[in-house]
Image (cartoon, helix red, strand yellow):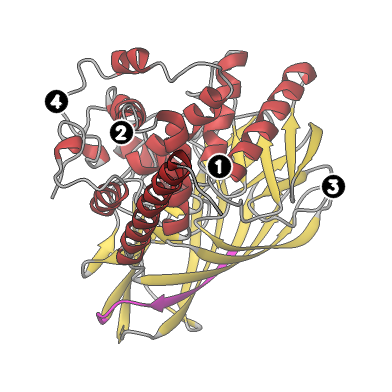
Amino acid sequence: MYLSFFSILVIFLCFQVLKVNIVLVSNNNEVKKSFTPNTVPAGNHASYDLNIVMSEKEEFEVIAKVKVQNKSEDNWTDLVFYFIPNIFTKQTLDSVGQSSAHPGTVTIPTVKIDGEKVDFSLEQDTLKIDLNNELPPSSEVNVSFTYNFTLPDKGLRYTKNNGNYYLAQFYPMLATYRNKEWNKEDYRFKGETYHTNFSDFNVTYKLLNGYTLVSTSPNDPKEVKQIGTLQANNVKDFFAVILKEHFLIEKEVGNTNIRLFGFGDDKQLSQEVSEIASEAFMYFEKTIGPYPHNQLDIVLDGKSMEYPGVVTAYSIDDHAKLPPALLKSTVVHEIAHQWFYGIISNDPYHEAWLDEGFAEFATGLYFYSKLNEGVPYSNLNEVVKGLDQLPVNLSLDQYEQDKQSSYIYGKSNVMLWKLFEKRGEIKEAEKFVKKYYDNYKFKEIDSEEFIRFIKYYFNLKDNSVFKDWLEVK
Protein backbone atom coordinates (compact mmCIF):
# COMPACT_ATOMS: atom_id res chain seq x y z
CA MET A 1 0.00 0.00 0.00
CA TYR A 2 1.28 3.42 -0.91
CA LEU A 3 1.53 5.91 1.95
CA SER A 4 1.90 9.62 1.38
CA PHE A 5 4.41 11.69 3.31
CA PHE A 6 1.48 13.25 5.22
CA SER A 7 0.12 9.81 6.17
CA ILE A 8 3.56 8.71 7.36
CA LEU A 9 3.89 11.92 9.38
CA VAL A 10 0.47 11.37 11.00
CA ILE A 11 1.36 7.76 11.87
CA PHE A 12 4.70 8.91 13.31
CA LEU A 13 3.05 11.60 15.45
CA CYS A 14 0.37 9.20 16.64
CA PHE A 15 3.07 6.72 17.63
CA GLN A 16 4.90 9.43 19.59
CA VAL A 17 1.68 10.37 21.42
CA LEU A 18 0.99 6.69 22.12
CA LYS A 19 4.58 6.26 23.27
CA VAL A 20 4.24 9.23 25.67
CA ASN A 21 0.94 7.88 26.98
CA ILE A 22 2.48 4.45 27.53
CA VAL A 23 5.31 6.04 29.48
CA LEU A 24 2.90 8.14 31.52
CA VAL A 25 0.68 5.16 32.28
CA SER A 26 3.71 3.10 33.12
CA ASN A 27 5.10 5.81 35.38
CA ASN A 28 1.69 6.37 36.97
CA ASN A 29 1.29 2.66 37.70
CA GLU A 30 4.79 2.63 39.08
CA VAL A 31 3.91 5.51 41.44
CA LYS A 32 0.67 3.84 42.50
CA LYS A 33 2.43 0.58 43.27
CA SER A 34 5.06 2.38 45.29
CA PHE A 35 2.51 4.02 47.64
CA THR A 36 1.20 2.09 50.61
CA PRO A 37 -1.03 3.85 53.15
CA ASN A 38 0.66 4.22 56.51
CA THR A 39 -2.41 4.55 58.74
CA VAL A 40 -2.69 4.88 62.51
CA PRO A 41 -2.88 1.37 64.01
CA ALA A 42 -5.66 0.44 66.41
CA GLY A 43 -4.23 -0.42 69.82
CA ASN A 44 -7.50 -1.91 70.99
CA HIS A 45 -10.87 -3.19 69.88
CA ALA A 46 -14.22 -3.16 71.64
CA SER A 47 -17.48 -5.02 71.01
CA TYR A 48 -20.57 -3.71 72.80
CA ASP A 49 -23.74 -5.41 74.02
CA LEU A 50 -26.15 -2.74 75.29
CA ASN A 51 -29.54 -3.27 76.94
CA ILE A 52 -31.65 -0.11 77.38
CA VAL A 53 -34.91 0.09 79.35
CA MET A 54 -36.96 3.30 79.51
CA SER A 55 -39.13 3.85 82.59
CA GLU A 56 -42.26 5.93 83.24
CA LYS A 57 -40.13 8.40 85.24
CA GLU A 58 -38.06 9.31 82.15
CA GLU A 59 -35.21 7.28 83.60
CA PHE A 60 -33.10 4.85 81.62
CA GLU A 61 -31.55 1.67 82.97
CA VAL A 62 -28.62 0.29 80.99
CA ILE A 63 -26.61 -2.88 81.20
CA ALA A 64 -23.51 -2.42 79.04
CA LYS A 65 -21.23 -5.36 78.34
CA VAL A 66 -17.97 -4.57 76.58
CA LYS A 67 -15.50 -7.11 75.25
CA VAL A 68 -12.12 -5.37 75.31
CA GLN A 69 -9.20 -6.67 73.26
CA ASN A 70 -5.60 -5.59 73.72
CA LYS A 71 -4.21 -5.15 70.20
CA SER A 72 -1.11 -3.26 71.32
CA GLU A 73 2.33 -4.61 72.19
CA ASP A 74 2.04 -3.52 75.85
CA ASN A 75 0.78 -5.12 79.04
CA TRP A 76 -2.17 -3.11 80.33
CA THR A 77 -2.60 -2.33 84.02
CA ASP A 78 -5.86 -0.38 83.62
CA LEU A 79 -8.76 0.35 81.30
CA VAL A 80 -10.03 3.84 80.47
CA PHE A 81 -13.52 4.69 79.20
CA TYR A 82 -15.30 7.90 78.28
CA PHE A 83 -18.47 8.21 80.34
CA ILE A 84 -20.02 11.45 79.08
CA PRO A 85 -23.36 11.21 80.98
CA ASN A 86 -21.43 12.17 84.12
CA ILE A 87 -20.51 15.54 82.56
CA PHE A 88 -24.15 16.65 82.73
CA THR A 89 -24.77 15.94 86.40
CA LYS A 90 -25.12 18.90 88.77
CA GLN A 91 -21.92 18.01 90.62
CA THR A 92 -19.77 17.98 87.48
CA LEU A 93 -21.41 21.00 85.87
CA ASP A 94 -20.86 23.00 89.07
CA SER A 95 -17.21 21.92 89.23
CA VAL A 96 -16.49 23.21 85.70
CA GLY A 97 -18.45 26.45 86.05
CA GLN A 98 -21.41 25.40 83.92
CA SER A 99 -24.99 25.78 85.05
CA SER A 100 -28.17 23.93 84.17
CA ALA A 101 -31.71 24.39 85.45
CA HIS A 102 -32.36 20.70 84.81
CA PRO A 103 -29.14 18.65 84.91
CA GLY A 104 -29.03 14.93 84.35
CA THR A 105 -28.41 12.22 86.93
CA VAL A 106 -26.21 9.12 86.89
CA THR A 107 -25.92 6.16 89.27
CA ILE A 108 -23.45 3.30 88.68
CA PRO A 109 -24.11 0.52 91.21
CA THR A 110 -21.73 -2.07 89.76
CA VAL A 111 -18.82 -2.58 87.41
CA LYS A 112 -17.55 -6.10 86.81
CA ILE A 113 -14.64 -7.69 84.97
CA ASP A 114 -15.20 -11.27 83.86
CA GLY A 115 -18.10 -11.49 86.31
CA GLU A 116 -16.27 -10.17 89.38
CA LYS A 117 -17.08 -6.80 90.91
CA VAL A 118 -14.25 -4.27 90.68
CA ASP A 119 -13.52 -0.79 91.96
CA PHE A 120 -13.45 2.13 89.56
CA SER A 121 -12.95 5.90 89.59
CA LEU A 122 -15.10 8.43 87.77
CA GLU A 123 -13.89 12.00 87.36
CA GLN A 124 -15.81 14.19 84.93
CA ASP A 125 -16.05 11.90 81.86
CA THR A 126 -13.05 9.65 82.66
CA LEU A 127 -14.01 6.24 84.01
CA LYS A 128 -10.91 4.28 85.00
CA ILE A 129 -10.63 0.67 86.14
CA ASP A 130 -7.38 -0.62 87.66
CA LEU A 131 -6.82 -4.23 86.64
CA ASN A 132 -5.98 -6.77 89.30
CA ASN A 133 -3.98 -8.71 86.72
CA GLU A 134 -2.13 -7.26 83.76
CA LEU A 135 -3.78 -7.76 80.38
CA PRO A 136 -1.08 -8.92 77.94
CA PRO A 137 -1.12 -8.32 74.16
CA SER A 138 -3.67 -10.32 72.15
CA SER A 139 -5.76 -10.96 75.28
CA GLU A 140 -9.27 -9.83 76.15
CA VAL A 141 -11.53 -9.16 79.13
CA ASN A 142 -15.27 -8.71 79.49
CA VAL A 143 -16.36 -5.59 81.34
CA SER A 144 -19.95 -5.02 82.41
CA PHE A 145 -21.60 -1.85 83.73
CA THR A 146 -25.01 -1.49 85.32
CA TYR A 147 -26.20 2.10 85.61
CA ASN A 148 -29.20 4.43 85.55
CA PHE A 149 -29.44 7.93 84.11
CA THR A 150 -31.81 10.76 83.37
CA LEU A 151 -31.07 13.17 80.55
CA PRO A 152 -30.46 16.89 81.08
CA ASP A 153 -32.55 19.60 79.47
CA LYS A 154 -30.43 21.61 77.04
CA GLY A 155 -27.52 19.23 77.27
CA LEU A 156 -24.93 19.03 74.50
CA ARG A 157 -26.06 16.31 72.08
CA TYR A 158 -26.80 14.10 75.09
CA THR A 159 -30.07 15.79 76.01
CA LYS A 160 -33.84 15.88 76.31
CA ASN A 161 -35.38 18.27 73.80
CA ASN A 162 -39.00 18.92 72.79
CA GLY A 163 -40.11 15.64 74.33
CA ASN A 164 -37.45 13.66 72.46
CA TYR A 165 -34.54 11.82 74.08
CA TYR A 166 -31.12 12.05 72.45
CA LEU A 167 -28.86 9.22 73.60
CA ALA A 168 -25.52 10.49 72.30
CA GLN A 169 -22.43 8.91 73.87
CA PHE A 170 -24.70 7.42 76.56
CA TYR A 171 -22.63 4.26 77.20
CA PRO A 172 -19.07 3.69 78.50
CA MET A 173 -16.94 4.14 75.37
CA LEU A 174 -13.50 2.56 75.39
CA ALA A 175 -10.81 5.15 74.71
CA THR A 176 -8.14 4.43 72.09
CA TYR A 177 -4.77 3.11 73.17
CA ARG A 178 -1.61 4.29 71.43
CA ASN A 179 1.96 5.36 72.13
CA LYS A 180 1.93 3.29 75.34
CA GLU A 181 -0.99 5.12 76.94
CA TRP A 182 -4.72 5.69 76.79
CA ASN A 183 -5.51 8.53 74.39
CA LYS A 184 -8.07 10.20 76.64
CA GLU A 185 -8.36 14.00 76.90
CA ASP A 186 -10.55 16.13 79.14
CA TYR A 187 -14.08 16.86 77.99
CA ARG A 188 -14.70 20.21 76.28
CA PHE A 189 -18.06 21.81 75.59
CA LYS A 190 -17.01 22.82 72.06
CA GLY A 191 -15.87 20.23 69.55
CA GLU A 192 -15.83 16.44 69.72
CA THR A 193 -13.49 15.29 72.50
CA TYR A 194 -14.01 11.53 72.33
CA HIS A 195 -11.94 9.26 70.12
CA THR A 196 -13.03 5.68 69.54
CA ASN A 197 -12.10 2.88 67.16
CA PHE A 198 -14.44 1.03 64.79
CA SER A 199 -16.59 -1.34 66.85
CA ASP A 200 -19.52 -3.76 66.64
CA PHE A 201 -22.77 -3.23 68.56
CA ASN A 202 -25.69 -5.40 69.62
CA VAL A 203 -28.45 -3.31 71.22
CA THR A 204 -31.70 -4.43 72.84
CA TYR A 205 -34.27 -1.89 73.99
CA LYS A 206 -37.62 -1.47 75.71
CA LEU A 207 -39.47 1.83 75.27
CA LEU A 208 -42.68 3.34 76.54
CA ASN A 209 -45.77 3.18 74.34
CA GLY A 210 -45.93 5.72 71.54
CA TYR A 211 -42.20 6.25 71.10
CA THR A 212 -40.09 5.46 68.04
CA LEU A 213 -36.39 4.63 68.15
CA VAL A 214 -34.05 5.95 65.44
CA SER A 215 -30.46 4.77 65.63
CA THR A 216 -27.12 4.08 64.02
CA SER A 217 -28.32 0.58 63.19
CA PRO A 218 -29.43 -0.03 59.59
CA ASN A 219 -32.14 -2.39 60.88
CA ASP A 220 -34.28 0.08 62.81
CA PRO A 221 -37.92 -1.08 62.81
CA LYS A 222 -40.08 0.45 60.10
CA GLU A 223 -43.07 0.64 62.44
CA VAL A 224 -43.41 1.90 66.01
CA LYS A 225 -42.06 -0.90 68.16
CA GLN A 226 -41.52 -0.81 71.92
CA ILE A 227 -39.21 -3.83 72.15
CA GLY A 228 -36.46 -4.79 69.73
CA THR A 229 -32.89 -5.80 68.97
CA LEU A 230 -30.52 -3.88 66.71
CA GLN A 231 -27.06 -4.44 65.28
CA ALA A 232 -24.43 -2.13 63.85
CA ASN A 233 -21.02 -3.31 62.72
CA ASN A 234 -17.76 -1.50 62.05
CA VAL A 235 -18.98 1.91 63.24
CA LYS A 236 -17.24 4.57 65.35
CA ASP A 237 -20.00 4.86 67.95
CA PHE A 238 -23.70 4.13 68.47
CA PHE A 239 -26.35 6.85 68.60
CA ALA A 240 -30.06 6.55 69.33
CA VAL A 241 -32.88 9.09 69.59
CA ILE A 242 -36.29 8.27 71.02
CA LEU A 243 -39.01 10.31 69.30
CA LYS A 244 -42.60 11.01 70.28
CA GLU A 245 -44.51 12.96 67.62
CA HIS A 246 -43.03 13.32 64.13
CA PHE A 247 -43.68 12.79 60.45
CA LEU A 248 -41.59 10.69 58.10
CA ILE A 249 -40.33 11.29 54.55
CA GLU A 250 -38.54 8.41 52.83
CA LYS A 251 -36.49 8.24 49.63
CA GLU A 252 -34.67 5.32 48.05
CA VAL A 253 -31.28 6.38 46.69
CA GLY A 254 -29.48 3.46 45.09
CA ASN A 255 -29.27 0.78 47.77
CA THR A 256 -29.93 3.18 50.64
CA ASN A 257 -33.19 4.27 52.23
CA ILE A 258 -32.91 7.90 53.36
CA ARG A 259 -35.43 8.65 56.10
CA LEU A 260 -36.16 12.20 57.25
CA PHE A 261 -37.93 12.72 60.60
CA GLY A 262 -39.66 16.09 60.75
CA PHE A 263 -41.69 17.90 63.39
CA GLY A 264 -44.52 20.40 63.56
CA ASP A 265 -46.10 21.92 60.46
CA ASP A 266 -42.96 22.66 58.45
CA LYS A 267 -43.52 19.87 55.94
CA GLN A 268 -42.63 21.90 52.85
CA LEU A 269 -39.15 22.76 54.16
CA SER A 270 -38.67 19.17 55.31
CA GLN A 271 -39.53 17.97 51.82
CA GLU A 272 -36.97 20.37 50.34
CA VAL A 273 -34.33 19.19 52.82
CA SER A 274 -35.12 15.59 51.89
CA GLU A 275 -34.63 16.39 48.19
CA ILE A 276 -31.27 18.10 48.62
CA ALA A 277 -30.08 15.44 51.09
CA SER A 278 -30.87 12.69 48.60
CA GLU A 279 -29.16 14.54 45.77
CA ALA A 280 -26.05 15.24 47.86
CA PHE A 281 -25.93 11.64 49.07
CA MET A 282 -26.06 10.40 45.47
CA TYR A 283 -23.27 12.80 44.52
CA PHE A 284 -21.06 11.67 47.43
CA GLU A 285 -21.54 8.00 46.61
CA LYS A 286 -20.70 8.60 42.95
CA THR A 287 -17.77 10.96 43.60
CA ILE A 288 -16.21 9.66 46.83
CA GLY A 289 -17.24 6.04 47.19
CA PRO A 290 -19.96 3.68 48.47
CA TYR A 291 -21.85 4.36 51.68
CA PRO A 292 -21.55 1.13 53.70
CA HIS A 293 -25.10 0.86 55.08
CA ASN A 294 -28.58 0.52 53.60
CA GLN A 295 -30.13 3.29 55.69
CA LEU A 296 -29.38 6.92 56.57
CA ASP A 297 -31.57 8.89 58.97
CA ILE A 298 -31.99 12.69 59.18
CA VAL A 299 -33.60 14.13 62.30
CA LEU A 300 -34.61 17.80 61.94
CA ASP A 301 -34.31 18.64 65.61
CA GLY A 302 -31.60 19.40 68.15
CA LYS A 303 -28.00 20.44 67.66
CA SER A 304 -26.60 19.85 64.19
CA MET A 305 -24.36 16.82 64.49
CA GLU A 306 -23.17 13.69 62.71
CA TYR A 307 -23.33 10.13 64.00
CA PRO A 308 -22.83 6.86 62.13
CA GLY A 309 -26.00 6.31 60.12
CA VAL A 310 -27.77 9.38 61.58
CA VAL A 311 -27.51 13.15 61.29
CA THR A 312 -29.36 15.74 63.35
CA ALA A 313 -29.90 19.31 62.15
CA TYR A 314 -31.88 22.21 63.52
CA SER A 315 -29.56 24.68 65.22
CA ILE A 316 -25.92 25.43 65.88
CA ASP A 317 -26.38 26.41 69.51
CA ASP A 318 -29.45 24.29 70.37
CA HIS A 319 -31.69 27.36 70.46
CA ALA A 320 -32.18 29.37 67.26
CA LYS A 321 -33.51 27.49 64.26
CA LEU A 322 -31.26 27.75 61.24
CA PRO A 323 -32.56 29.72 58.22
CA PRO A 324 -33.73 27.37 55.41
CA ALA A 325 -30.66 27.82 53.15
CA LEU A 326 -28.24 27.29 56.04
CA LEU A 327 -30.25 24.30 57.30
CA LYS A 328 -29.94 22.63 53.89
CA SER A 329 -26.19 23.22 53.61
CA THR A 330 -25.76 22.03 57.22
CA VAL A 331 -27.57 18.78 56.41
CA VAL A 332 -25.25 18.28 53.43
CA HIS A 333 -22.22 18.93 55.67
CA GLU A 334 -23.42 16.39 58.25
CA ILE A 335 -24.08 13.82 55.52
CA ALA A 336 -20.53 14.37 54.22
CA HIS A 337 -19.33 13.31 57.67
CA GLN A 338 -20.60 9.81 56.93
CA TRP A 339 -17.49 9.56 54.74
CA PHE A 340 -15.13 11.86 56.65
CA TYR A 341 -15.31 10.49 60.18
CA GLY A 342 -17.75 7.61 59.61
CA ILE A 343 -15.61 5.78 57.04
CA ILE A 344 -12.25 7.58 57.06
CA SER A 345 -11.43 7.94 60.73
CA ASN A 346 -9.37 10.54 62.59
CA ASP A 347 -8.82 11.73 66.14
CA PRO A 348 -11.40 14.55 66.57
CA TYR A 349 -9.54 16.10 69.52
CA HIS A 350 -6.02 16.25 68.08
CA GLU A 351 -6.87 16.17 64.34
CA ALA A 352 -10.32 17.79 64.14
CA TRP A 353 -9.62 19.43 60.79
CA LEU A 354 -9.41 16.05 59.06
CA ASP A 355 -13.13 15.45 59.42
CA GLU A 356 -14.53 18.99 59.75
CA GLY A 357 -12.36 20.48 57.02
CA PHE A 358 -13.01 17.56 54.67
CA ALA A 359 -16.77 17.62 55.37
CA GLU A 360 -16.80 21.33 54.44
CA PHE A 361 -14.66 20.57 51.38
CA ALA A 362 -17.04 17.80 50.25
CA THR A 363 -20.02 20.08 50.85
CA GLY A 364 -18.39 22.66 48.58
CA LEU A 365 -17.70 19.99 45.96
CA TYR A 366 -21.38 19.15 45.85
CA PHE A 367 -22.61 22.73 45.57
CA TYR A 368 -19.90 23.87 43.11
CA SER A 369 -20.61 20.83 40.92
CA LYS A 370 -24.11 22.20 40.36
CA LEU A 371 -22.83 25.58 39.08
CA ASN A 372 -21.82 26.41 35.52
CA GLU A 373 -18.87 28.44 36.71
CA GLY A 374 -15.55 27.90 38.44
CA VAL A 375 -14.84 27.70 42.14
CA PRO A 376 -14.89 31.28 43.56
CA TYR A 377 -11.33 31.29 44.90
CA SER A 378 -11.42 35.03 45.54
CA ASN A 379 -14.32 34.52 47.97
CA LEU A 380 -12.51 31.64 49.64
CA ASN A 381 -9.45 33.81 50.17
CA GLU A 382 -11.58 36.23 52.19
CA VAL A 383 -12.35 33.44 54.67
CA VAL A 384 -8.71 33.04 55.71
CA LYS A 385 -7.81 36.68 56.14
CA GLY A 386 -6.40 37.12 59.62
CA LEU A 387 -6.08 33.36 60.15
CA ASP A 388 -2.47 32.95 59.05
CA GLN A 389 -0.92 32.81 62.51
CA LEU A 390 -1.97 29.26 63.49
CA PRO A 391 -2.00 25.93 61.66
CA VAL A 392 -5.26 23.98 61.40
CA ASN A 393 -3.93 20.72 62.85
CA LEU A 394 -3.55 21.74 66.49
CA SER A 395 -5.38 20.07 69.37
CA LEU A 396 -8.66 21.69 70.39
CA ASP A 397 -7.22 23.08 73.61
CA GLN A 398 -4.69 25.15 71.65
CA TYR A 399 -7.31 27.38 70.04
CA GLU A 400 -9.29 30.18 71.61
CA GLN A 401 -12.80 28.81 71.79
CA ASP A 402 -14.35 31.60 69.74
CA LYS A 403 -11.80 31.06 66.94
CA GLN A 404 -11.64 27.27 66.95
CA SER A 405 -14.22 26.78 64.18
CA SER A 406 -12.59 29.41 61.98
CA TYR A 407 -9.50 27.21 61.76
CA ILE A 408 -10.77 23.64 61.75
CA TYR A 409 -13.81 24.32 59.51
CA GLY A 410 -12.93 27.49 57.59
CA LYS A 411 -9.20 27.73 57.03
CA SER A 412 -8.74 23.98 56.52
CA ASN A 413 -11.49 23.92 53.88
CA VAL A 414 -10.05 26.91 52.02
CA MET A 415 -6.53 25.50 52.03
CA LEU A 416 -7.77 22.17 50.71
CA TRP A 417 -9.37 24.05 47.82
CA LYS A 418 -6.20 26.00 47.15
CA LEU A 419 -4.39 22.72 46.49
CA PHE A 420 -6.50 22.45 43.32
CA GLU A 421 -6.58 26.10 42.27
CA LYS A 422 -3.90 25.55 39.62
CA ARG A 423 -4.05 21.77 39.57
CA GLY A 424 -7.25 20.90 37.71
CA GLU A 425 -9.74 22.61 40.03
CA ILE A 426 -13.02 20.81 40.72
CA LYS A 427 -12.56 17.90 38.30
CA GLU A 428 -9.22 17.03 39.85
CA ALA A 429 -10.65 17.55 43.34
CA GLU A 430 -13.34 14.97 42.57
CA LYS A 431 -10.70 12.48 41.40
CA PHE A 432 -8.69 13.19 44.53
CA VAL A 433 -11.44 12.43 47.05
CA LYS A 434 -12.11 9.12 45.30
CA LYS A 435 -8.43 8.15 45.54
CA TYR A 436 -8.33 9.35 49.16
CA TYR A 437 -11.37 7.19 49.98
CA ASP A 438 -9.92 4.13 48.24
CA ASN A 439 -6.72 4.37 50.27
CA TYR A 440 -8.15 5.19 53.71
CA LYS A 441 -11.66 3.72 54.01
CA PHE A 442 -12.17 2.10 57.44
CA LYS A 443 -8.74 3.23 58.53
CA GLU A 444 -7.49 6.12 60.65
CA ILE A 445 -5.45 8.95 59.17
CA ASP A 446 -3.49 11.79 60.78
CA SER A 447 -1.92 14.99 59.45
CA GLU A 448 1.45 13.36 58.87
CA GLU A 449 -0.12 10.71 56.64
CA PHE A 450 -2.27 13.32 54.85
CA ILE A 451 0.86 15.29 53.97
CA ARG A 452 2.53 12.11 52.75
CA PHE A 453 -0.48 11.29 50.54
CA ILE A 454 -0.71 14.80 49.08
CA LYS A 455 2.97 14.75 48.17
CA TYR A 456 2.47 11.39 46.46
CA TYR A 457 -0.72 12.47 44.68
CA PHE A 458 0.72 15.70 43.24
CA ASN A 459 4.29 14.41 43.02
CA LEU A 460 5.54 17.21 45.28
CA LYS A 461 9.21 17.38 46.22
CA ASP A 462 8.92 19.53 49.35
CA ASN A 463 6.44 20.78 51.98
CA SER A 464 6.00 24.31 50.65
CA VAL A 465 2.27 23.91 49.87
CA PHE A 466 1.62 23.24 53.57
CA LYS A 467 3.24 26.42 54.76
CA ASP A 468 1.04 28.57 57.03
CA TRP A 469 -1.73 25.99 57.41
CA LEU A 470 -0.29 22.67 58.57
CA GLU A 471 2.23 22.00 61.30
CA VAL A 472 4.69 19.59 59.67
CA LYS A 473 6.61 17.20 61.91
| Residue 218: x %, y % from top left | 70, 55
Please rate how many residues cluster around mark 3, counting C-alpha atoms within 10 Å: few if below 14, some from 14 to 19, many from 20: few
Residue corresponding to mark 3: 224
Asked whether 80 or 362 is in front, the reply is 362
Image quarter of residue 250: top right
| Residue 295: x %, y % from top left | 71, 49
Is residue 52 found left or right of 225 in the rendered image? left
Image: magenta residue range: 63-75
Q: Earlier in the sequence, mark 3 or mark 2?
A: 3
> In front of the other: label 3 or label 2?
2
**Does the magenta portion include 150?**
no
Residue corresponding to mark 2: 419
Q: Which residue does the image show at 53% across and 45% down from the upper left?
A: 288
- The kind of residue tagged 3 is Val
Tell me the chief SS of the magenta region. Answer: strand
- The kind of residue tagged 4 is Gln
**Does the magenta portion include 71?**
yes
Farthest right residue in view: 223
Asked whether 255 or 308 is in front, the reply is 255
Tell me the element at label 2. Answer: loop
Q: Which mark is residue 287?
A: 1
- The kind of residue tagged 2 is Leu
Q: Which mark is residue 389?
A: 4
Q: CA distance from mark 2 to mark 1?
A: 18 Å
Q: CA distance from mark 3 to mark 2?
A: 48 Å
Marks 2 & 1, CB-CB < 8 Å contact: no
